[in-house]
Image (tube, rainbow, N blue to C red):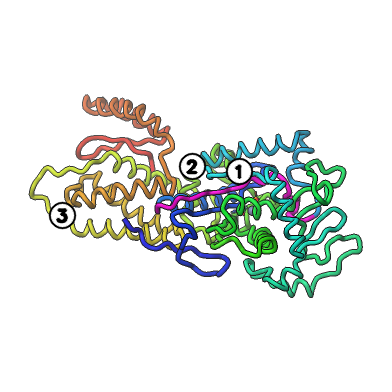
Amino acid sequence: MSFGELRIYNSLTRKKEIFEPLHAPHVGLYVCGPTVYSDVHLGNCRTFTMFDVVYRYLSFLGYKVRYVRNITDVGHLVGDADEGEDKIAKKAKLENLEPMEIVQRYTNGFHDVMKALNNISPSIEPTATGHIPEQISLVERIIENGYAYERNGSVYFDVEKYNQNYHYGKLSGRNIEEQLAGHRTLDAQEEKRQPVDFAIWKKANPEHIMRWHSPWGEGFPGWHLECSVMSMKYLGNEFDIHGGGLDLQFPHHECEIAQAVAGSGKDPVRYWMHSNMLTMNGTKMSKSLGNVIMPAELFEGTNALMSEAYSPMVLRFFMLQTHYRSTMDISDDALKAAKSGYLKLINALRTIRNMDYENTAEDIQINEKAVKDIQKSIDTIHKGLNDDFNTAVALSGIFNLVKKVNTLQLGQLLPAQLGKETFELLKHSLLRISEDVLGLQEETPNLSPLIDVVLDMYKQAKESKDYDKVDALRQEAKAIGIVFRDLKNGSIWAYEE
Ligand code: AMP
Ligand code: ZN
């Protein structure tokens, strides 16, 4: 089955482009991972979930994706600048632990959250500390090519020199000439030639605990270096997609391009993708601003701004309701609405999964309008996903299918009125897109057999007209978010929407 052409908005060209992999059916996808000095917040989760959908949709289309997402475990300094403490080393000192204990703890926590959100593990999850020799050799190549200089054991990227031959600022659109001309002069003790230069290797001060031998003495790599090295090591000198949050576009990704070009003469990335920020009251959710909500607070219902607990799947559904290039504001109301939408979807998935095509009567006419509606909705879903992974549009198509499933459940529409092909297409599309592409699934399917037992008790109580028991069972079920529905051909249970 052909799903049409996929278009991706390329941040580099600022255009939507038809996706043409360099080595189809293989696709290389690199996503900047977390800096593991603290737990990820919901903002981080948005970006990682968004790229999980990119990975899932590309796989759904039949591509064999090598998905690389790194772990930053050294080199990211407090303030994201070239001076200051390493974020991980700082936390280690504070807690009197080894830096690698900090790294392990928050990597484990990150994995737990990704699992709860049903984000698929990347194919490779390389760490910055595991690639120090490769980073040193890239620094050497950049120096050899004349785009970096050493000062007192640190190495800086020469932005002005680079910009004479290439274009520093091509990704972020920043005008480097203005910055070069208008900048303050540097203090005598500063090592950089220009304030815009950035460190690719830093000398370790005596108190700096994370340090490695290098041709320039003991030190550690600059933050931007790891992604240049690891993306090219695992995906090649040219690869398809590089992604991350919009806040990484500058300086992180701009510097990555400069390093790769300065080292190898070529920009390795074909499509640059950036997901927009999760905000609260219009302000970016960020650790430095202190306005973060942590996943655990949301899942356990301990966040003061939230009236109840929201599960990981509700959070995922909420995130998919907005296209990834738009900002998205989180609030209790928005999550409440997402919860209701998610449960509607899950109820429909349960219904259609358990429904089989049957045609007992011979004189049943095909309902042409319903067939057309279903085809149109499936079309909407694929058009949405093909239009730069527009999950919001895809969800609108999915909800049209959900409506059809509900009419099937109520017996207002019969599978036979759709014909076998359309019925199977509806079933297949709804389940595969929701579960495989969007990663939305029932959270407690293991409870179903138990609820089935309670449903049987409910049916018996109804049959024997024991209405007190019927009420009591209804209430007990409601307490765990379950309702009984009495349909034409019997009673069923569903999640309370
Ligand atoms: P960090 O660990 O801070 O380097 O961030 C990990 C990822 O989360 C990066 O891709 C960031 O761009 C992304 N990120 C950080 N804050 C937000 C936010 N408020 N909304 C969406 N993504 C974010
Ligand atoms: Zn990166």
User: In this view of the protein, can residue 337 be seen by the observer?
Assistant: no
Q: Earlier in the sequence, mark 2 or mark 1?
A: 2
The residues bearing labels 2 and 1 have C-alpha atoms spaced at a distance of 17 Å
- Residue placed at 63% from the left, 64% from the top? 266
Query: Could you tell me if the residues under marks 2 and 1 are in contact, i.e. CB atoms within 8 Å?
Result: no
Residue lying furthest front: 144
Q: Residue beneath label 2, please?
A: 118
Q: Residue beneath label 1, please?
A: 294
Q: Indicate whether 292 appears above or below 276.
A: above
Residue lying furthest right: 188
- Residue placed at 82% from the left, 43% from the top? 208
Q: Residue beneath label 3, please?
A: 366
The residues bearing labels 3 and 2 have C-alpha atoms spaced at a distance of 38 Å
Type of the residue with mark 1:
Met
Residue 164 in percent (x, y) is at 73, 73
Q: Nearer the viewer, residue 162 or 188?
A: 162
